[in-house]
Amino acid sequence: MTLALLAAAPKGPLDTWSPTLLALFALLLPLIALVIVLAFTIDSRRVSAWIAVVFTLAAAVCTLLVVAIEVAHPLHLERPATFLQFFTGQSGSAAEFTLQWGVLADPLAAAVSVTVALASLLVQIYALAFMRREDGVVRFFCVLLFATFAMLGVTFATNYFEMLLFLGLVTLSTYLMIGHWWQREETSAAASRAFIISAIGDLALLAAVAYIYFRYNELNFQALSGHYTGGRVSANGLFAMAILVFIAAAAKSAQFPLHVWLPGSAQAPAPAAALIHSAGSAICGVYLIARAYGLFHASPRGLALLAIAGGLTAVLGVLWALFQDNLKRAIAYTTMSELGLMVLALGIGAYGASIFELFTHAWPKALLFLAAGVIIRELRTERLAEMGGLWGRMRFTGWLMLIAVAAGAGIPPFSTFWSKDTILSKALALGSPLAIAVVVAVTFFGAIALVRIFALVFTGETARRRRFEPDRIRDAGGRIALAMAVLAIACVVSGIRGFRGRTDPIAFVTFPGVPLPNSHYVAAGVIAATAVLGAVVAFVLYARRVSLPVALQPVRQAMGEGLFVDRAYRLAAVGVVLPLSRAASWVETRVVDGALDLVGDSIAFAGQPRRWLAEARIRPLLIGFFAGVVALGTLAIVLAGGIIGKIG
Amino acid sequence: MPLIGALPQPITSAPLVLFVYLVLILLLGSALASVLLRNTVYAIAAFAAGLVLVALLYLAIAPFLLVAVQLLVFTTVSAAFLIGLLRATTGLRTSSVGRLSPEWIVGAAVSAVMFALLALVLGATSWPVQFCCGLGAENFGAVLGNTYAVGLAVLAVILGSAALGSGLLLAAPTLPSPRGGGSTSSRSPGGGGSTTVRR
Amino acid sequence: MSAGLNLILVASAALFVVGVFGVVARRSAVVMLLGTQFMFIAGAIAFVAFARFGLGALHGTAGATMALFAGAIAVAELAVGLAMAALVYREHRSFALDADRG
């Protein structure tokens, strides 16, 4: 095994620094921090937390530098840096395949890595104050560092196998984050559910990796990018690969049939939930599709699958979000719809727009969760029905949440307006009425869902509850407020494009062969109008607490339960998996263990000393042994000599 | 016997030849000493000297890594084991163990027959046959790491266990005897001498 | 005067039979184990000799690798054998493996 580290570039301006080296630093810094915390400072909460923040800050700086370099050199295609190479064989076909682990710093990775690193940094700053009096603070920060490392690894992965490994780490980190308060039963159940579904995705990706390797003998993204259209694999084969990759992405990004873990992620502490939804597992799936986009681009049916599944997810998510009573679950369902929108954008060919949406959506979503954390803590309830009237009491949080809601809804000039505008432009350019309708509908209902949350929380009167005094509510301050304020600023500025002299952020992330959408003024206007209309409708409905007619209450409950998909899964698990598990367990205890016991018993039986062996004399045995060797050797030589004599 | 390829390349530089001869003679001498000496401690010393001489032989005809491993690992670990065992059992005394017995004659006979057989094999196969090709000077370390990586890993585990075991044995107190007395240093020399000769 | 394959092979054979003698003729368990060690070493030297001088030269490192592995196996076997010798000692207070006792 040889270890090859790319030589460090000399310090200098943006022209000479190597983005891959910076990406490597960004990747390793959270891991180093994790090791330091686990090894040295595990007993000190403050020091561990500050180490985590400082190292994540360094990692964020590295990712920003990577982006800066990529922006300064838009045509610079970086070769991936390999830091570990396993030679899998000395000769034959095994020697031609070397498993490489490294970092790839291209514009796509740079854009997403900035999202991950900055979101993680802000969440950690928030958690410094938010989790101060909790149990398990050090564990929390360790898990956040681990999650940051895993997600940066996914972002910088150079080949499918490395991505598979890091997605497995993301699965684990999601489980750890959701299950932080594992003593609660619903939390541990939610964490297990998230783990199982993510693991299903990892299995699908493993199958995809095996299939891709089997057909192409290559796993590297850059090397494969030209192979998909070569015609070596049939259209059906490409579609099969696309399906497998899509299943993996769907499990991670909560697309329709595999979305059931996302509402459960609301069980996580607010900073962890913010990280998962804005820059965590949720975006890993979209990123996987973006990395494997060559595959989807070569398979039109794959793209159609993306579009259909994404659209379905987006619509369902936003509809379910309208009927949630739990604040964090409501926000979680809006995330589901936004993820569906991203996948839909990839499906209709708006590659840059989808990544742009990923970037702009992260900030409002994180801010929503962080604000929700503050609100829930102050109000000591998670139910929207018991909230209200906070505008007077928590003005600062209110303004921040207003910005977040506006940004998430797509109201200009906040962040997601710009990205949704480009998605709609692409849909208009394609001329597909279904896509246009879906995007518009999702924007409309998404605005309603988010403003509903805002209205229910901040307007009206606080519901009276036992042992709760509304006058003791305090607004957020200190580091919490700082983190949220930075996010709010990001919500405002992160989408703005088209200013004179600035590069269009969409053009930054491109896929060869996929044309950039021109921004239609029509699209911009439609999005703006839809979002504002939705906001107004929601405000009117929910500020006045207009309640649903009684006849529609069952609908409300059905929607609130996510159309019982979760229950269907549970029934399937109980009905199908449990008997299978029992049968397997019977086989293991009776058959497998029985066979092993048999072997062990027979060896023990054979090992018992027998009388003749105990009474044997060693010297004669040895002499006999060597005499036998001599005899056999002589015989062999005679025979060999005879044979050789016949030949030679 | 068919000719396969080029001539073998024996060592011809005189000092090196003398060196090889010397090492081989000393090696045989130490081996004989090791099996003939009645004092176990001296036998072990001869054995260790033999291993060092083998390392010197490897210096002439084998990659240096092998020399280093032989010297640093095998010799030290084997010697440590043996010394440790002696410390734990009889103690490092220099009294003799065992006496000349008729079995030695039988043993010598068997050895002589076996040597004759091996010499016959050598004579019949090595002289007329020319072996192939020049010396491939591959990088031993790289080959170990690539082709024999698995074997190397297993070997490392085995050697590590052996080193650990020898260290433990050296550090452990002496074995408790079933007939009383822990440390052998408390036994009287007279009693030690009389109980070791048995039939 | 040259030192070639045959010299080392003869030496290896001689070393081997010295080891055989040690195993067959001596009574002490420790010395018998030393004999087995010499047998291993003889084999290893033969491998190295072939690798250096003759047939194995095509894969020169294979012979050295074999010597390395043989040495390691010898050490492992020594460990196990010495453990058994220690047990014998504990039982009978000497290393002698007497023919009568077995």
Image (cartoon, coloured by chain):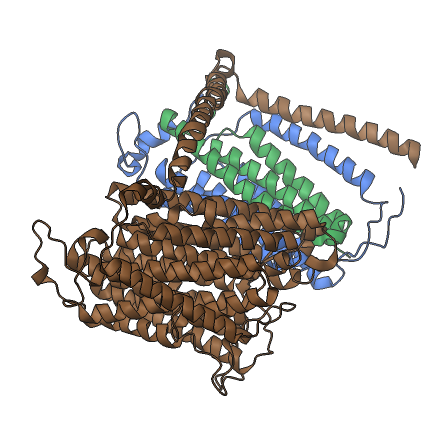
Chain colours: A brown, B blue, C green
Q: Give the image location of residue B25, x and y in percent.
A: 64, 49
Q: Give the image location of residue A34, x and y in percent.
A: 34, 61
Q: Based on the displayed image, in which of its 4 quarters is residue A400 positioned?
A: bottom left
Q: Against A564, is B179 above or below? A: above
| Image position of A305 (left or right of B138) | left
Q: Based on the displayed image, in which of its 4 quarters is residue B28 positioned?
A: top right
Total of numbered circles in the picture? 0
Q: Based on the displayed image, in which of its 4 quarters is residue C17 positioned?
A: top right
Q: What residue is drawn where x is 46% and y is 62%?
A: A440
Work out whether residue B139 can be spotted.
yes
A280 or C85: nearer the viewer:
A280
| Image position of A185 (left or right of A146) | left
Q: Give the image location of residue A407, x and y in percent.
A: 36, 69
| Image position of A435 (left or right of A441) | right
A251 or A181: nearer the viewer:
A251
Q: Against A180, is A441 above or below? A: below
C15 or A275: nearer the viewer:
A275
Q: Against A372, is A208 above or below? A: above
Q: Give the image location of residue C14, x and y in percent.
A: 67, 40
Work out whether residue B144 can be spotted.
no
Q: Against A139, is A9 above or below? A: below
| Image position of B117 (left or right of A100) | right
A624 or B194: nearer the viewer:
A624
Q: What residue is drawn where x is 92% and y is 34%?
A: A647
Quarter that holds the N terminus of chain C:
bottom right
Q: What residue is drawn where x is 62% and y is 70%?
A: A515
